[in-house]
Image (cartoon, rainbow, N blue to C red):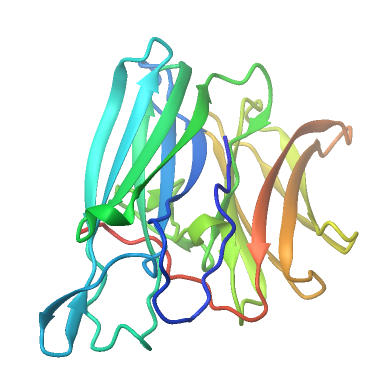
Amino acid sequence: MRALLFPLAFTITAAQAGPPQLLLRVASFRSLDQIKKGGEIEISVTVPTQPLTYRQRAPKSFQSSAVVELTILKADGTTAWQETVTLKPPVLSDTTIAIKNPLSFLKRVSLPDGSYTLRGHIRDQYNSANGEATVELPLAVEAPKGPAFSDIVFLARPAAKATGESVFNRGGYLLTRAASGYYGRGADNIFFYTELNQVAAGRAVRVHYHLAAPDGTAADADAPAVTVQGGRPTALVGQLPLGPIPAGSFTLTIEARDAATNKVLATQSQHGQRSLTDYAPAGAAVPR
């Protein structure tokens, strides 16, 4: 369900030639609708704006534009959901030296259980010759047969208690996603959110976090025990210091154990990226 489709390179440089890029990350959650079974798919989209064409709108005023089309296809090839988003980055006064920050947005889609394909397509609206890009991800929406975590979502800042319904709210929290699971220069901690499903109400669960890099560097932490509430998934939020983790890829693994028997109930992992030199893009915002 998770994929990092292109190397993350959010370096602050001048304009770069090349076709547009599209970075997708998908998180799957079980639907809270007890009548209509299925899942909720959250699609996090990041578009690096440096490869885009900037058109002059006025003296010392330049702007780019990209069209992103997202389609979810059923196993038989028919369309289950489709939406087109036009992205217009902020106006710049000088495209040769200005910082061109990647843009991110989030979409939430409810789907019945089944197999799907997510297709993302991007084109440079101001330069048809600049090329286009298409990426695809397989999706499997299915109910867990026993205790299981949802996908882990990396956050740009700590989850905040919140009420109301929006694409940024889940489990009673306001969540600001870290674009493509990327933590940049100055980030001292990773923040994350997940949900534990299919555990009997009243059961006490201990949660352990393990953060590791490919070179063997690792950090571990235990969260306070939680008592599962009935009728809905148990929301879990946490953070870990990045301190010893070097630049490059890392993996966060979350493990749930029965507090009474120490039996492992569920595990889930998610991959992220860390940079010690480049700043991370802003968290996902409402697309214009």
Please determine whether, in this image, residue 186 is positioned above or below residue 117: below
The relative height of residue 113 versus residue 130 in the rendered view (above or below) is above
Residue drawn 22% across the image and 42% down it: 84
x, y percent for residue 5: 55, 47
Q: Is residue 252 left or right of residue 59?
A: right
Q: For the point 66% across and 71% down, which residue is it?
A: 189
Q: Residue 254: horizontal and vertical position, in percent?
A: 74, 46
Question: What is the residue that sits farthest to the front in this orientation?
Answer: 129
Residue at 55% across, 30% down? 230
The residue nearer to you, when weighing 89 against 179, is 89
Q: In which quadrant will I find the C terminus?
A: bottom left
Q: Quadrant of residue 75?
A: top left
Q: Is residue 74 visible?
A: yes
Measured as percent of width and height from the top left, residue 279 is found at 54, 78
Q: Position of residue 53 (x, y in %)?
A: 27, 67
Left/right placement of residue 251 relative to residue 32 reads right
